[in-house]
């Protein structure tokens, strides 16, 4: 046997043994505090319930709804296609796999927007991009999409447009019946042909 | 720093360039290790030539230990590399079919191309069969599509399943591989003594 093989074997053994000495730093990588602060003071992380509703209705494939409430609340009510990642199990490998997928926009949802905001800060700090918070959370969702208030007459035209959209969205999400469901009553009138007196010309 | 493409250091368009360079290097090393000879390859099965086992085990343990050091030095982020999803039963069956084909044909797909490159006729026929097999597989795929996708364990590693740390696995695997090198050289010597019709 060639002596070089013995050296190589020993070298490989030492290298493999060395991997046991490597200390793993389990700290996740984080972004700089200044950058986090910069992102934090911008309101751009908020998306409105209208925007979310629009994306759901249009079946936008880039939308990824993450519901951060606990699974009990999630089962009672949740938005269509939302994924449940409870806030207390956020920092686990399986949960974090949901974030940072190229081309997706992650929108966090909670009852109000406090828990969602907390999750947003954590994920931002872990360096995930394209994460958003649904402004007002599910409470706002109920108020605006499920049970929209009609604007008063003095409101600007935009308010009426939003209301019209919300009414449509309400139909989409609740399957509620339209208000003018009653069919207009049409009187059926049979029109009889008046008998003409005698032959009117012809052959 | 790495992996280069997911970290945006080079763009994804380099994929093919890297693939070609790696392919050339792989083919060169296959040929240089004698894998273009089906006698060398099937030798593992008959016990007279374990060069395949040695080359592949060397590649595996060097890469494995190397990757762990790269991760430690911060050159490669191990959490970002792609892990092939595990489909347990289909993979076992696939392995068995591959092994039978190995002994029967004397090549694996990669080595058959390396052998064609140096002009081996048996490799040409092997490759024709290979493409025939791919064709039949594609046509018959709906028949076993369910089995093909069954038992998906996801992108798991042995560390995920057993909880034993990566470095212990690396250590254990290296010891097994090195022991196999010495063990197989003893088997080789004994088997070769009894072979008369084939000279080495």
Image (cartoon, rainbow, N blue to C red):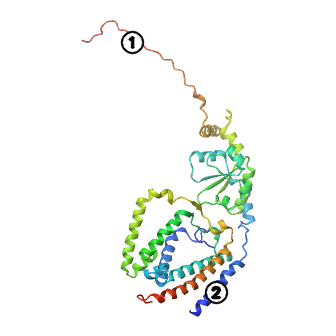
> Closest to the observer: B88 or B116?
B88
Q: Residue at x 50, y 73 (%)?
A: B19
User: Residue A19, which numbered label?
Assistant: none
To which residue does mark 1 refer? A193
Q: Quadrant of residue A62?
A: bottom right
Q: Nearer the viewer, mark 2 or mark 1?
A: 2
Percent x, y of residue B150: 54, 58
x and y, in percent, of residue B44 in the image = 49, 80
State the count of labels: 2
Estimate how packed mark 2 is, as few (under 14), some (14 to 19) or many (20 or more) residues with alpha carbons within 10 Å. Answer: few
Name the image quarter holding the N terminus of chain B.
bottom right
Judge by depth and name the residue closer to the eye, B197 or A72. B197
Q: Residues within 10 Å of mark 1 (few under 14, many from 20)?
A: few
Task: Answer with mark 2 or mark 1, whichever residue precedes in sequence.
Answer: 2
Which quadrant of the rendered structure holds the C terminus of chain B? bottom left
In this image, B51 relative to A88: left or right?
left
Give the residue at the far top of this rendering.
A197
- Chain letter belonging to callout 1: A
Pick the front one: A162 or A108 = A108
- Residue A41 appears anywhere in the view: no
Task: Give the residue at mark 2.
Answer: A11
């Amino acid at each position: 046997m060639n002596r070089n093989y013995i050296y190589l074997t020993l070298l490989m053994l030492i290298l493999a043994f060395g991997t046991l000495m490597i200390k793993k730093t389990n700290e996740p990588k984080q972004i700089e505090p200044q950058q986090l602060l910069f992102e934090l003071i911008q309101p751009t992380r908020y998306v409105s319930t209208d925007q979310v509703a629009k994306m759901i209705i249009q079946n936008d494939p880039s939308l990824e709804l993450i519901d951060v409430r606990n699974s009990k609340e999630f089962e009672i009510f949740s938005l269509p296609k939302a994924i449940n990642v409870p806030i207390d199990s956020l920092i686990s490998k399986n949960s974090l796999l949901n974030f940072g997928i190229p081309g997706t926009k992650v929108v966090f949802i909670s009852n109000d927007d406090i828990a969602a905001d907390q999750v947003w800060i954590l994920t931002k700090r872990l360096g995930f991009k394209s994460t958003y918070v649904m402004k007002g959370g599910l409470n706002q969702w109920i108020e605006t999409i499920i049970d929209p208030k009609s604007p008063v007459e003095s409101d600007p035209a935009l308010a009426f447009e939003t209301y019209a959209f919300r009414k449509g969205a309400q139909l989409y999400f609740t399957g509620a019946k339209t208000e003018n469901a009653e069919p207009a009553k049409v009187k059926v009138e049979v029109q009889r042909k008046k008998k003409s007196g005698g032959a009117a010309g012809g052959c | 720093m790495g992996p280069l493409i997911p970290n945006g250091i080079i763009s994804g368009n380099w994929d093919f360039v890297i693939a070609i360079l790696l392919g050339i290097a792989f083919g060169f090393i296959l040929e240089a290790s004698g894998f273009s000879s089906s006698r060398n390859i099937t030798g593992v099965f008959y016990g007279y030539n374990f060069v395949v086992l040695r080359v592949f085990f060397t590649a595996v343990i060097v890469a494995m230990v190397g990757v762990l050091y790269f991760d430690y030095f911060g050159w490669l982020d191990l959490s970002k590399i792609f892990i092939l999803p595990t489909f347990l039963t289909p993979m076992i069956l696939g392995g068995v079919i591959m092994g039978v084909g190995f002994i029967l044909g004397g090549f694996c797909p990669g080595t058959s191309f390396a052998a064609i490159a140096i002009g081996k006729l048996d490799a040409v026929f092997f490759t024709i069969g290979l493409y025939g097999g791919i064709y039949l597989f594609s046509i018959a795929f709906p028949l076993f599509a369910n089995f093909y996708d069954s038992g998906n364990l996801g992108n798991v590693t042995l560390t995920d399943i057993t909880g034993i740390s990566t470095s212990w696995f690396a250590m254990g695997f290296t010891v097994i591989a090195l022991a196999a090198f010495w063990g197989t050289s003893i088997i080789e010597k004994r088997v070769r003594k009894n072979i008369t019709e084939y000279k080495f």
